[in-house]
Image: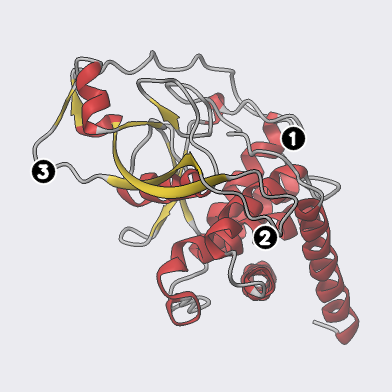
């Protein structure tokens, strides 16, 4: 690779990172699931009893829990709430921690004009996923939308990596134990407000392909020392920034989409005390992209 090519790649990656940061600072909104799943909403965790969406850090906390444990339904509730619905949490089921705030009145600070006397205190609550209860009927499976249109350049790039990719079910993930990428059936992809279903399919696949570069025999990407218990969130940042870079380089999308910024912004909530997290993730994503491009040269 020439020095000119290296400079061009670094500039492109820096530009994409800057665009994502700018979109986050501008408030990109909430992310959308780009494929259909059994149950609603398509992306954000929902309380089974109230039907309300979880928000704030609870969103990414429940995302992480679902990802680690293989849950496909974004439906959660406390033990008591499941009982009110006539469902029973199975013995031995593991709960996930969520945080809610209770408001109470207190004496106003006479030296602070903005003090309205209202105070908020954080309270912990524990919720169980629909997969861990009996007596709850999940909605019917989503209807098929047919095959997506192939993007030849993206197909060539992905094939040259040599990654094993399987399709089926309603989840997208890279499984280190089997070293394979699992994608939802392509007929389920519906796109988002800013990406059509073909772009969405490849953006998700390139996200998982970035995860695929993490093992020791590839990029040896161990984020545990840098991010400690927030390693999962950091790896998601790497994968999504890597997907944004690859989408631009391969020509899947012509610009950095709001979807990338929305996804990254939500994971950054788990890393809000680490202002350098996105730059570390961008550097690791750039390494992953360089590795994948090196496989193209070999091919």
Residue 38 visible in the shown view: yes
Along the viewing direction, whichever of 279 and 168 lies nearer the viewer: 279
Q: Are marks 1 and 2 in contact (CB under 8 Å)?
A: no
Task: Determine the residue positioned at 57% across, 56% down.
Answer: 269
Toward the bottom, the furthest residue is 3
Task: Determine the residue positioned at 65% across, 28% down.
Answer: 148
Q: Give the mark nearer the N terminus: 1 vs 2.
A: 1
Task: Determine the residue positioned at 64% across, 39% down.
Answer: 31
The answer to whether 279 appears left or right of 33 in the picture is: right
Along the viewing direction, whichever of 2 and 49 lies nearer the viewer: 49
Q: Are marks 3 and 2 in contact (CB under 8 Å)?
A: no
Eye-nearest disc, 3 or 2 = 3
Image quadrant assignment for residue 229: bottom left
Q: How far apart are the alpha carbons under marks 3 and 1?
A: 41 Å
Image mark for residue 92? 3
The residue identified by callout 1 is 195
Say few, some or many: other residues with alpha carbon within 10 Å of mark 1 (under 14 / 14 to 19 / 20 or more): some
Image mark for residue 241? 2
């Amino acid at each position: 690779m020439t020095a000119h090519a290296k400079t061009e790649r670094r500039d492109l990656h820096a530009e994409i990172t800057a665009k994502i940061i700018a979109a986050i600072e501008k408030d990109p909104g909430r992310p959308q699931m780009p494929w259909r799943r059994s149950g609603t909403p398509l992306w954000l965790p929902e309380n089974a009893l109230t039907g309300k969406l979880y928000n704030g850090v609870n969103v990414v906390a429940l995302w992480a829990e679902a990802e680690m444990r293989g849950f496909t339904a974004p439906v959660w509730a406390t033990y008591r709430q499941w009982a009110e619905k006539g469902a029973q949490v199975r013995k031995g089921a593991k709960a996930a921690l969520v945080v809610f705030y209770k408001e109470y009145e207190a004496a106003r600070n006479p030296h602070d004009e903005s003090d309205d006397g209202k105070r908020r205190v954080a309270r912990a609550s524990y919720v169980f996923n629909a997969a861990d209860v009996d007596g709850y009927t999940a909605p019917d499976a989503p209807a098929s939308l047919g095959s997506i249109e192939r993007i030849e350049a993206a197909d060539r790039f992905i094939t040259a990596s040599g990654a094993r990719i399987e399709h089926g079910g309603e989840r997208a993930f890279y499984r280190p134990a089997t070293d394979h990428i699992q994608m939802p059936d392509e007929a389920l992809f519906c796109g988002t407000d800013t990406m059509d279903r073909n772009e969405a399919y490849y953006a998700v696949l390139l996200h998982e392909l970035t995860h695929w570069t993490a093992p020791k025999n590839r990029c040896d990407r161990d984020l545990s020392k840098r991010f400690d218990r927030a390693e999962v969130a950091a790896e998601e940042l790497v994968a999504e920034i890597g997907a944004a870079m690859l989408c631009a380089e391969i020509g899947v999308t012509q610009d950095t989409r709001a979807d990338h910024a929305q996804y990254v912004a939500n994971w950054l909530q788990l890393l809000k005390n680490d202002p350098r997290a996105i730059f570390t993730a961008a550097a690791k994503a750039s390494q992953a992209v360089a590795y994948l491009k090196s496989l193209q040269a070999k091919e």
